[in-house]
Amino acid sequence: MNTPSNVMPESPLESQVAAPPVIPATRRLYWSVRRELWEYRSIYIAPLVVAAFFLLAFLIGLMVSPAHRHEPLDIPYELAAALIMGTAFIVGIFYSLDALYGERRDRSILFWKSLPVSDLTTVLSKFTIPLLIIPLLSFAIAVVTQFLMLLLSSAVLLGSGLSVGTLWGRMSFFRMSLMLLYHILTVHGLWYAPIYGWLLLVSAWAPRAPFIWAFLPAFVIWGIEQIAFRTSYFLAMLQYRLAGPQPSTTMAYGGAMMDMLSALTPAQFFSTPGLWIGLAIAAAFLAIAARLRRYREPI
Amino acid sequence: MACIEARGLRKAFGTTIAVDGVDLRVEEGRILGLIGPNGAGKTTALNAILGLTPYQGELKVLGRDPWTEREKLMRDVSFIADVAVLPRWIRVSQVLDYVAGVHPRFDRAKAEGFLAKTAIKRSSKVRELSKGMVAQLHLALVMAIDAKLLVLDEPTLGLDILYRKQFYDSLLNDYFDRSRTIVVTTHQVEELQDVLTDLMFIDRGRIVFACSMEEFESRYLEVMVNPEQVAAARALKPIHERQVFGRSILLFDRVDRQQLAALGEVRTPGIADLFVAVIGNQPSGAQGAAR
């Protein structure tokens, strides 16, 4: 300290050293989300496997029944998307149930809590997975699958000397993808948010068997309501939540899923009270889950 | 400012009182050994200090309330709460990435340096490592964090003697300096004897004994008494007496060394022997002490 060479750089360096190093909350969240992807690899493996099997089945179908080549081609595309999204939804349910339970079961919660990451950041990072990461991943996988299906169809058509013009002309690939993205983000993300919130809460609380604790209350409430009041509002509420926001009377006809969705404009979707009630409930569930995690110890 | 300061720290699980009004003050730069039988409340007390469990009474760690400020506290405190709490699915490279990503005081190069001295491969998963290697990995992570307080709860449980020795050696040589504080609990007290600066015995939720190691060494002496002088030795009021190979070993508190040298071979007692003496002298507290 008393040599000139030490004194000189003091002013710029000292100010850096004196300020306590702080890592921004977004960066902690980012690494926490990455950690989840390291741990739960089924998040992307399961939809990828489903997509691969679907492509295989589609290819076999093209080979063995050439008659299909002249049929309307939208249906297998929608089926592919539906299968992948369905898989992703199931993965999301199992993920959410294990997210805050698994770390207690394997005692790693003691390691995570030794790091300067708050319980809320942890819970939010785990909520991000079913809310955003799984939907976006399943969207990407679905679109790539559909694109590969289109290429396979084209190749088979070309191989049999038919024109691919009608196929590509009829498929509005870009529009289909856009609708899919919209559906995934709104329904699988925002609309289902309270479901994920509930599962995370149970996962943070359950002393064991989170699966049973998550679903048993629903049966009990439904049963009590049936016996005591002979009504089924609770069941209707669950159905409403699972089925997604339905278009109002303007959409009387059934039609395929994509048509139905295109009718529910963003304006309609975001003015559905059910969406905001659901999000508020999800926020409450998450707050409780974060609070619970503070008290929880390894099982 | 004391590193840890507790007044009337209390924690009950239902009707079981785990920590029963503990007063504690740990100054900066000390290495405190917290010794006690199973179920004495060591882990509960440490959990309170680390913000892992709510408590009653006053507790400040580095000036913060650990229960409400765990996140901030963990920038300056690191801990190994138990062996094998590193998640089994994680890769060594991933755990380095993660800690570097979330911890402002983590020096990744330092951790890599510690790991380079071990046989731990960067691509291994924790589940593929031996128990000793997991402990080495955790220690490497913790030592690369520039923390003010390090808490170790049974950090070497189940490790073989070689790893245990290495563990404390690297802790002392590569990590500890006078500005850090270490609190450690263990059952293998003998290995800690040369490591500690302070000693504390805890039994049934209470601190029953506390002293610095200098005080320990100057106050307590153990004499292997010559058979013919046992009666004379007993007259000096030993705090404990035990038999080894037919010889009486008597433990004395604050008795002159010259006086004892006349009775037999004098030496500094082991922590474990003092522990047995102190806990054994507690009313009805002898049951768990021998473990």
Image: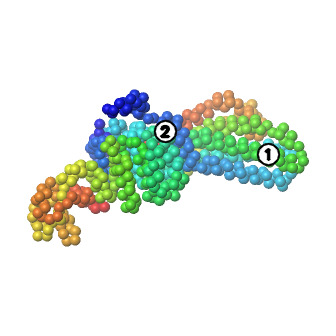
- Left or right of A231: which side holds B265? left
Label 2 sits on a secondary structure element that is helix
Give percent across and percent down for residue B175. 37, 47
- According to the picture, the residue beneath numbered tag 2 turns out to be A120
- Identify the residue at horizontal 84%, vertical 55% (top origin): A64
Within the image, what quadrant is residue B177 found in? top left
Instruction: Please identify, in this view, whether the residue under mark 2 or under mark 1 is nearer the observer.
Output: 1
Q: In terms of sequence position, does the residue under pointer 2 or pointer 1 come before the other? A: 2
What subunit carries mark 1?
A
Q: Residue furthest front?
A: A4
Give percent across and percent down for residue B139. 42, 51
- Identify the residue at horizontal 54%, vertical 39% (top origin): A30
- According to the picture, the residue beneath numbered tag 1 turns out to be A151
Give percent across and percent down for residue A53. 72, 53
- Identify the residue at horizontal 29%, vertical 51% (top origin): B196
Q: Residues within 10 Å of mark 2 (few under 14, many from 20)?
A: some
